[in-house]
Image (cartoon, grey):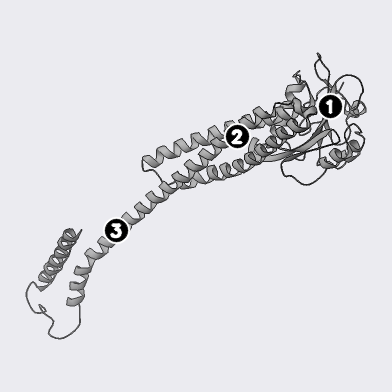
């Protein structure tokens, strides 16, 4: 059986290309006690025991026809997957839960990136549908793990696993930002601040963006947890409380990064201002030291009658001595005043 042509999330190596509907990236069937099995478009809503995970490329407009045929999901959930709105949140309707969660973007040239994208999802007890418009990290890695035999117990576990993987990547990113700040802090303490202001900019920009996304995602998970407690349903099986705690902990780490970066930027600015003031003071002293000599030279350079020392032997050297004496006297005055 031939493999499908490369796609953004090509992990379903067992698919028959003829069985892949337009916009369908992969589909797996999960049954109790058995390894997940890749299925084609014709078997997306196969009856019997178990449930199906369907992953779609929402950038392909042809996936609308596939979604229209997924009658196991209520119409509101199917319509939600095609909306342009990207705000985090969850909604329950018709026995299904649908919403938007975060995932890091993935580029084949650069690998995983710190840019955050959106993953839409909708699920009930029979099927879970996820969709993205650009390649994403967590959903790709989870697809690879499922292809290798990872077993998931319920549709809600797909979403919680995706959020968990996003959280793990976010934690690594926070640790990387902490390490960058440690390096910058060492340079600042050593008074090597020439480039550190520029190095702080990407860290602060990254921390601000990540903090904003984590706060919204944490709120979404808390809302999910509240709905699970009130409504019950299949989404109550997911351990969303643990995810909320992890997200809150990482959000606290990002807040610490932001605070450290802000304090370091203030310290760098203060040191740069101190260096500038020191340079200006040196320049001012040098300029002041030149004033007495310039005054004497200007005095003896006047082209007027009765100029002193004009006809005096050694007059030039007397004028030089007067200039040096004036400069020395001005220097001593500055020393006394400083």
Secondary structure of residue under mark 3: helix
Please tell me whether residue 39 is drawn above or below residue 80 in the rendered image: above
Placement of the C terminus among the 4 image quadrants: bottom left
Badge 2 density bin: few <14, some 14–19, many ≥20, Cα 10 Å = some
Query: How far apart, in angstroms, are the residues tagged by discs 1 and 3?
Result: 75 Å
Residue 168, image x, y percentages: 62, 29
Secondary structure of residue under mark 2: helix
The answer to whether mark 3 and mark 2 are in CB contact below 8 A is no
Q: Nearer the viewer, residue 5 or 225?
A: 225
Asked whether, in this view, residue 305 is left or right of residue 214, the answer is left
Checking the image for residue 94, the label placed there is none
Checking the image for residue 248, the label placed there is 2
Residue, far left: 313
Which residue does the numbered mark 1 point to in the structure image?
125
Badge 1 density bin: few <14, some 14–19, many ≥20, Cα 10 Å = some
The answer to whether mark 1 and mark 3 are in CB contact below 8 A is no
Numbered disc in front, either 3 or 2: 2
Instruction: Place residue 19 in its image quadrant.
Output: top right
Please tell me whether residue 36 is drawn above or below residue 202 in the rendered image: above
Residue, far front: 230
Residue, far top: 33
Residue 2, image x, y percentages: 86, 23
Q: Nearer the viewer, residue 73 or 40?
A: 73
Secondary structure of residue under mark 1: loop
Badge 3 density bin: few <14, some 14–19, many ≥20, Cα 10 Å = few
Please tell me whether residue 160 is drawn above or below residue 194 in the rendered image: above
Give the mark, 1 or 3, whose residue is nearer the N terminus.
1
Residue 204, image x, y percentages: 53, 44
Residue at 71% across / 30% down in the picture? 162
Query: How far apart, in angstroms, are the residues tagged by discs 2 and 1?
Result: 28 Å
Which residue does the numbered mark 3 point to in the structure image?
281
Please tell me whether residue 90 is drawn above or below residue 320 in the rendered image: above
């Amino acid at each position: 059986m031939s493999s499908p042509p490369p796609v953004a999330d090509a992990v379903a190596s067992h698919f028959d290309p003829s069985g892949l509907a337009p916009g369908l990236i992969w589909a797996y069937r999960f049954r109790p006690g058995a390894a997940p099995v890749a299925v084609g478009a014709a078997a997306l809503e196969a009856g019997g025991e178990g449930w199906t995970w369907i992953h779609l490329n929402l950038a392909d407009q042809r996936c609308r026809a596939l979604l229209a045929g997924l009658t196991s999901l209520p119409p509101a959930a199917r319509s939600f997957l095609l909306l342009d709105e990207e705000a985090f949140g969850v909604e329950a309707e018709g026995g299904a839960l649908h919403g938007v969660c975060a995932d890091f973007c993935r580029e084949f040239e650069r690998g995983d990136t710190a840019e955050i994208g959106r993953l839409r999802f909708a699920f009930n007890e029979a099927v879970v549908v996820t969709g993205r418009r650009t390649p994403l990290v967590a959903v790709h890695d989870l697809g690879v793990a499922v292809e290798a035999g990872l077993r998931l117990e319920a549709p809600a576990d797909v979403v919680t696993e995706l959020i968990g993987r996003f959280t793990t990547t976010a934690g690594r990113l926070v640790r990387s930002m902490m390490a960058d700040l440690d390096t910058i802090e060492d340079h600042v303490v050593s008074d090597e601040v020439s480039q550190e202001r520029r190095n702080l900019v990407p860290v602060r920009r990254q921390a601000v963006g990540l903090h904003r996304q984590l706060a919204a995602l944490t709120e979404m998970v808390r809302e999910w947890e509240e709905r699970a407690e009130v409504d019950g349903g299949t989404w109550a099986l997911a351990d969303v409380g643990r995810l909320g705690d992890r997200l809150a902990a990482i959000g606290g780490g990002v807040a610490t990064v932001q605070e450290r970066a802000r304090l370091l930027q203030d310290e760098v600015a203060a040191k740069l201002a101190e260096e500038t003031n020191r340079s200006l003071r040196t320049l001012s002293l040098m300029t002041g030291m030149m004033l007495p000599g310039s005054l004497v030279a200007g005095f003896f350079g006047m082209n007027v009658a009765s100029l002193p020392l004009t006809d005096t032997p050694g007059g030039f050297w007397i004028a030089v001595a007067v200039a040096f004496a004036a400069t020395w006297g001005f220097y001593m005055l500055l020393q006394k005043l400083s």
